[in-house]
Amino acid sequence: MHVHLVTAEDPLTLHARARELIRFPQLTMPLLAALTPESWTVTHTDEITHTVDTAQRYDLVGITAATPGAPHAYELADAFRANGVTVAMGGPHATLMPAEVAKFADIVVVGEAETVWPRVLCDIEQEARYTVGRHVIDEATGANVEVLPNGAKIYRCPQPASLAGLPWARRDLIRHGGWNRWWATRGAIIATRGCPHRCDYCTIPVLYPEARQMRFRPVEEVAAEVAAIPDRGIVFWDDNIGANPRYAKALFRALAPLGKWWTSQTTMASVRDDEFLRLAAASGCKALFLGLESVSQESLAGAHKAHNRVDEYRQLLKRFHAHGIAVQAGIMFGFDHDSRDIFARTVDVMGEIGLDNATISLMVPYPGTPAYTRLQAEGRIVDHDWRHYNGKTHVVHRPLLMSPDELLAGYEWAKTQFYRPQHIVKRLFKSRTGLWWNVPRNVGYMRGLTGEVRSRAAMHRQEPV
């Protein structure tokens, strides 16, 4: 039997990422392929690099999508199902909104797939029939399948999967396609899952309610997989690779002899330890993503992210750069304490501290998060079109201290200012860290702004007046 796996992307991501110079592949579908029995033929399309051919016939199509890509994923599902192909959908949006997704798919996988995916395939092979209602399919884990009146099946497993013995991702299915071959890598991997923090806007605690209980792959298993990856560059798609310093340091010591360079993400709470940075650098860490989010301490406190200290940003950057590690910050606009001056303040601070680069976005209250629940109760969610939940093209909630139009205009201004050539030179002159990485990274983001503008214009043209 033949299963085709699709990594669906929203139009904005397609436009913007196509112009970036450094790109990393998503790991979800290559890992799902590794969990698929050998009796199945597995193929894969990542929409960042290739177009999905919905005219092809398969025994099963599996689609993963985040919230802004969900409407497009539904279009793909409709096209496949019109040709008689069974469609399974999973990923962040399916976990957040399973009943909605079940209107467009034959099968919905909620949460992590390690436990239930083999059972999904077995049920298809055996043409298993279930009556309407919920049925336990694994007493040990509590895994179950719920059959809805429309016939859709929702597979869930309440028990988090162990990461010990996790199969190696099928990197042979990662195709470069239109990617710049010099910068692309197949070296995507995970070492941990979960994050101990509960930030107001974050989906991780909602997607994985047990996320505060960190899970770890055995260090020796991670090191063995890294050593086997032919690419020198590695990206760890962990939620917070430094959440457990003891584990992180053991991992860094195991990576050090392998001669790789790597990047990942963590939080300020994890990197105040100088030994952490020293061992990370010695193991090949070239850059870390930090969710700084705001230069307003009030905004951070309101988002339940008070473990970030704005008065530490400058010294923190100096310590990173002293170890040769670049910092890519996550910056958001749209918190309740953000006033009209937040945009200029943010650009000034990021320039003064020598921030290497940043992912700048609008705060998005994804469904199921505390932010969404609160704003919905206050009547401040003003847009329910999931296509607009991309953090780039639309403001989907009503801010407290400015209008939605002012928030969108301020965000666009700040991002344009941050990636002006003069600002890039100013920041990188202060950083002087990893220019081989930072120059193409910044240029790629600058190019990506053009893609965002095109995508925004296209989306507005499609909307009714």
Image (cartoon, helix red, strand yellow):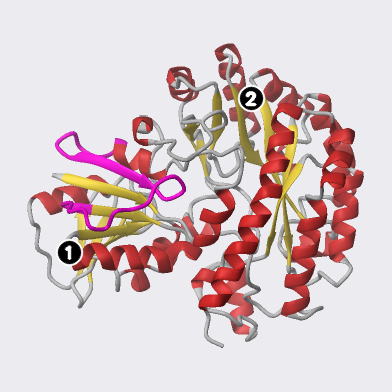
The one nearer the camera, 15 or 363, is 15
Residue 54 position by quadrant: bottom left
Q: Which residue is mark 1?
A: 83
Circle 2 sits in a helix, a strand or a loop, which is it? helix
In the picture, which quadrant includes the C terminus? bottom right
Q: Residue at x 48, y 34 (%)?
A: 188
Does 361 sit left or right of 73 as displayed? right
Q: Residue at x 50, y 38 (%)?
A: 179
Picture quarter with the N terminus: top left
Which segment is the magenta one?
34-60
Residue at image position (78%, 39%) is 356
Q: Position of residue 446 (x, y in %)?
A: 71, 49
Residues 250 and 172: in front is: 172
Residue 162: give x, y in percent of width and height.
Answer: 39, 38
Looking at the rendered image, the disc whose residue lies closer to the viewer, 1 or 2, is: 1
User: Percent from the top left, x then y, of residue 192?
Assistant: 51, 37
Residue 313, position as x, y percentages in the image: 85, 44
Task: Tell me the kind of residue under disc 2.
Answer: Lys
Q: Is residue 294 visible?
A: no
Q: Is residue 441 above or below residue 252?
A: below
- At mark 1, the secondary structure is loop
Q: Is residue 38 magenta?
A: yes
Name the residue that disc number 2 marks.
249
